[in-house]
Amino acid sequence: MQLKILTVDDSRAVRIIVKKAFKTYNVELIEAANGVEGLAAASKETPDLILLDVTMPVMDGVEMLTKLKSDPGLKNIPVVMLTAEAGREMVLKIAKLGIRDYIVKPFKEDVLTEKVGRIIDLRPISDTPNKKKTLSDRCDILVVEDKPAIIEQIKRGFRNPTWQVHGVASTGETIDFCQKSVPDLIMISLSLPDESAYTLFRLLRSNMKTKYVPVFGLVVKTDLHAQQQAQQFGFTSIITKPIDYEDLETKIAKAINLDTSERYFAFEEDYLIVHVPETNSTAALNEVSSYLKPKIAEAVDNGYTRVIFDVHTIKSVNMSFIKLLVDSMGICKELTLSYSLVGNPNVASECKGFEESKDWVFYSSIEEAKSRSL
């Protein structure tokens, strides 16, 4: 949902600065040049926050603020005052009227967004769900760990070459890194000295640049206390050591809204090919399942009429695997698509032991499945 910010200032230059400061956030800016216009705009739009200049013609900010606080429908709107006067008397005067914060002119854009972000839930436009990265896009992951061997291990563990792992050892290095370049995801070792992992988490969440960056806690599997503490703090996810990289990659993909469908789905000639991953793990099967309906619908929209489920790399069959294929076949039947199965002798044999799959026929290769479906 888009937030509304009302900026009331007689200076067009200041209004331009404010507009520029919020251009990358999911915010609608409403402008007014004095207190009278500001009150009218506040009554009409009911903004989520008001940026109010102190010194203006017609009606100044102090008078407008007084009228706002006396209006039952407007009194709860948070107000941040903009003032060129940093003296104690002016600050005390406007504070008594009930403002949430104040900013002394001239100000920097990041100071403005930082203070506003503490009051309302500012979200960058790029965080909207329709802006997905794919596996071919670069993904920067910052690992905060004082053991270099762990950082190197994580660098080697990822399969995707476009995922870049950067390692730092302390809170200060993390803040410096994020000031220069905001990573897509941050992993923090919960075993950092003096519980600095939690202090760092608070700093990241209080900074507008990193407020919405997913943060994973990295901890030894047996340290249940640290896992519980991290969950209470609000870490996006907990990763336990030794690291299961398939599970980690799945969690990262979900956290950064990454489209990983190209791992499993491919359009070839007149076919949609669905590759079920070799590991056959619950996480991988769930990932395939999450894409099934939209990918098969995409195939129909683009004129494809045939689907091949390629499971030839699977070494062993389980009920999650059976359910995935049963659901897949049901979707194909619903959309009147023909489908074929490609598998190895072991998969074909094991499937005969399940009631749901005892009659399934498997081709030995994708080429055979294509030739038989003509």
Image (spheres, rainbow, N blue to C red):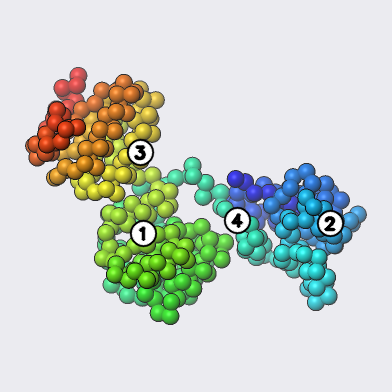
Q: Report the mark closest to the observer, 4 or 1.
A: 4
Q: Dividing the picture into quarters, in which one does residue 287 lie? A: top left
| Residue underneath mark 2 | 70
Label 1, residues with CA under 10 Å away: few <14, some 14-19, many ≥20: some
Q: Is residue 19 visible?
A: yes
Q: Amino acid at mark 1?
A: Gln
Question: Dot 3: few (<14), some (14–19), or many (≥20) neighbours within 10 Å?
Answer: some
Q: Nearer the viewer, mark 1 or mark 3?
A: 3
Name the amino acid type tagged 2: Ser
Indicate whether 85 appears above or below 14.
Answer: below
Q: Earlier in the sequence, mark 3 or mark 2?
A: 2
**Residue situated in front as seen by the camera: 33 or 138:** 33
4 or 1: tag closer to the N-terminus: 4
Determine the CA span between mark 1 and mark 3. 25 Å
Q: Residue 266 vs residue 125: left or right?
A: left
Name the secondary structure under disc 2: helix
Q: Give the labeled residue for mark 4.
A: 121
What residue is shown at x 45% (from left), y 76% (from top)? 196
Q: Could you tell me how far apart the alpha carbons at marks 3 and 4 are, in whole angstroms?
A: 30 Å
In the image, farthest residue toward the front: 355
Q: Which residue is mark 3?
A: 291
